[in-house]
Amino acid sequence: MNTRVLPLYATLLICIIAYAACVFQFPAMFSTRVAGNLLTDNAFLGIAAVGMTFVILSGGIDLSVGSVIAFTGVLLAVLITRYGVHPLIAFAIALLITTVFGAGMGAIIHYLEVPAFIVTLAGMFLARGLCFVMTTDSIPIDHEFYAMLQGLFYRLPGGGRLTFIGLLMMVVFIIGIVMAHFSKFGSYVYAVGGNRTSAELMGVPVARTTIGIYAMSGFLSGLAGIVFSLYTSAGYSLAAVGVELDTIAAVVIGGTLLTGGVGYVAGTFIGVIIQGIIQTYIVFDGTLSSWWTKIVVGVLLFSFIALQRILVFLSLKRTTATSGG
Amino acid sequence: MTDKPGLLTVEGICKSFIGFKALDGVDFTVRSGEIHALLGENGAGKSTLIKVLTGVHQPDSGVIKIDGQAVNVRDTQHAQNLGIGTVYQEVNLLPNMSVADNLFIGRQPMRFGFVNRKLMEERARELLAQYDLHLDVASDLSRYSVAVQQLVAIARAVDMSGRVLVLDEPTASLDRHETEILFAILRQLRARGLGIVFITHFLDQVYEICDRVTILRNGKLAGCALTAELPKIELVSLMLGRTLAIATHNTRRDRPVPAIRQFSFKGLGRSRSIAPFDLDIGEGEVIGMAGLLGSGRTETAKILFGIETADTGHVHIDGNPALIRTPQAAVACGFGLCPEDRKSDGIIGDLSVRENISLALQAQRGWFNRLSGREQTVLADKFVKALDIRTTDIEKPVKFLSGGNQQKVILARWLATNPRFLILDEPTRGIDVGAHAEIIALINRLCDDGMALLVISSEIEEIVAYSTRVVVLRDRAHRGELSGDEITASNILGMIAAEPEGASA
Ligand SMILES: Nc1ncnc2c1ncn2[C@@H]1O[C@H](COP(=O)(O)OP(=O)(O)OP(=O)(O)O)[C@@H](O)[C@H]1O
Ligand SMILES: [Mg+2]
């Protein structure tokens, strides 16, 4: 079997075991209600994590995600509440800005050969700073279009609600999976993450791909910002602090190698769901501090990185045993 | 032949890297329906010329013409669209992607806007079947050996070359059989009217398959002739700018068999890797290790050096038992290993020549007993001179050296540790004829100085030239040993080719 898929299976297994354990303790967790909420509550995280998966697959990192989400939220609130712009137009403006912002970072990373870590760190400060320039208050959004979108849901059997934003996340994941595995762009992403020089010599358009990846991450962060804004009905400069780290955690737990070139978008979905399950468990328990989420995620991260190292080591051993002269 | 049109022509190409002139007014023409050898010493500028042709580098001046029309090759993708397929010297492909992906990336068959994986894998299988390769094309490229990866790279380039195919040292890691297959395909392509550029350091292959040769020396054009009209001696002197006595034969001295052999390996083996073997080697001996790729040569080296731990057997050094389970332990016992796959196992591209050379010695000394900058410089200078490493200065990052010169740097790294027992895995691969002779001379000199050497090589003549004993491997086992007058090319070949005992292979 391909050792590359192992982390994915391991994640899936852990996810199932975790869920089973939760259900064992709180049978109420086995319901479409909980499942629906799981999707709704993590929709913005999931959408941003899809973008992060592409970035990490290409061997990069995007630290600006959380700030861009907050930026989008504040921008929407300002446009809609202060200037009376229709939400749809505000959405379009926000997505345009965040996509261009991402593409700009990609261009700097590629043409100036600055590490992605540095460029997106600067992007993180910049986007957060722009939030404060617009406003320091939390601005509520009260618009009938928002209310309409928030009221939109599909009733699952058993009383659960598949909300608009939950569904949107699923759609983004499906598009992400198709792009990663069945589009030329996807193959270029893996190629750049595998070996940038080789990719270049093989005729992969590295510049276009790098810019595209960060533009995509910017776009999806913007979309996550819209979802976050729908979820909270407000824009606040200090929102979504550290979300980029949660998305990175989801991506790594989902089996994607931080060094790039290896991983699956579907794994990231499971990574997001695992984080959601832990949170739900804490809510059900009622006595645990929500910081336990972070602790469990930390432990999971450690074990996954260790697992991946072991697998890489094993597969190296195997190739040396079968090759050579 | 001379009236055939120039398919790809370059005129007056100049290319400098930070003040260093790698190409200086080079003219070069590939005609339709010919195989054209591009020859020259390590660092002569062959690979640079290829990279200028294919858009990796932009020339400082000069023109590139395709079918008589001047073109400006923007990047590698543009070159591919112009019908130029290339295998670069430092080809690594994408180890994390599937074989099929590697063959078709950038030009995957599409259906409804999506990559049609099934069709792609089917085509990949068909393509590789021409090379007698039957792989699981859906699995990762990294699962396969260097030789297979090389063939995949070639298959990719051939499949993409509508007009011109460029191969930069494609045969360096191929065995005889694989080379034959490649040559058969090249002949077919030639008959179809492609122009083929073939870079190699194996002069025999030049005479076997090439119609014309162009020779570069120090970035300048040194000559261009029909292969049939250029005797080998002249070819070599055009390359080197001096005559070289290609007398690599019979440099082996009839040494008396050493009374004690300091290094003794008994029954070392590892299941599924190499059958248990005995090996004794004394100071001043050179053991040549012959066998086909995949016969267990590299595995032997890895076990001796502790990269792979042996399941069975024990080691004695100077009569005392020794435990070698890690490369560190091996180095502490005075071992050195110059690995086969230097691209991935050896070179650290961003470090300078000086740092790369001092690395192993520093590691041996321990990190707290630092080599001073001056000591490193002295060391590096010494080896740059001894091995004739062509570099502008020793502070140049190694990745900017030519392929052959990078290999010399790795060789220097291990020689610098002054080991008692040195294992060289394919030390002359990718190294030009001049340096080749120097390395053989060096092996003889080291042996005179009392070092014990184990040299793995695919070149039988070379093994004959320096070995005091020869071990022959086949099917992952040591099959026999030759010494003294038994060491002849035909004897070695005979043992390599012998029918396997027992029915299954
Ligand atoms: N990117 C670069 N920067 C600086 N110098 C370079 C660069 N690329 C090549 N060179 C220099 O140009 C010269 C020619 O190198 P090139 O790789 O073309 O040699 P080559 O003929 O292919 O040799 P070999 O047979 O060893 O592969 C070398 O001296 C090398 O150091
Ligand atoms: Mg070269």
Image (spheres, rainbow, N blue to C red):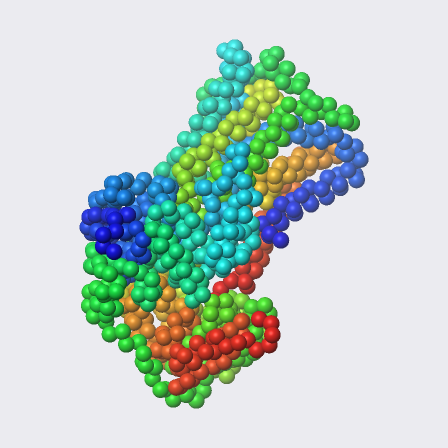
- Residue A261 in the figure: left or right of residue B53: right
Q: So how many labels did they put on this image?
A: 0
Looking at the image, which residue is at 31% across and 65% down? B207
Expressed as whole percent of the image width and height from the top left, the position of residue B148 reads 48, 58
Q: Which one is nearer the viewer's eye here, A152 or B59?
A: B59
Looking at the image, which residue is at 26% across and 63% down? B227
- Residue A138 in the figure: left or right of residue B446: right
Q: Which one is nearer the viewer's eye here, B275 or A117?
A: B275
Looking at the image, which residue is at 31% across and 63% down? B206
Displayed quadrant of residue A162: top right
Expressed as whole percent of the image width and height from the top left, the position of residue B49 reads 28, 51
**Above or below, comparing residue B288 to residue B196 in the picture:** below
Residue placed furthest toward the top: A84
Expressed as whole percent of the image width and height from the top left, the position of residue B69 reads 25, 41
- Residue A86 in the figure: left or right of residue B42: right
Residue A56 appears anywhere in the view: no
Looking at the image, which residue is at 53% across and 57% down? B134
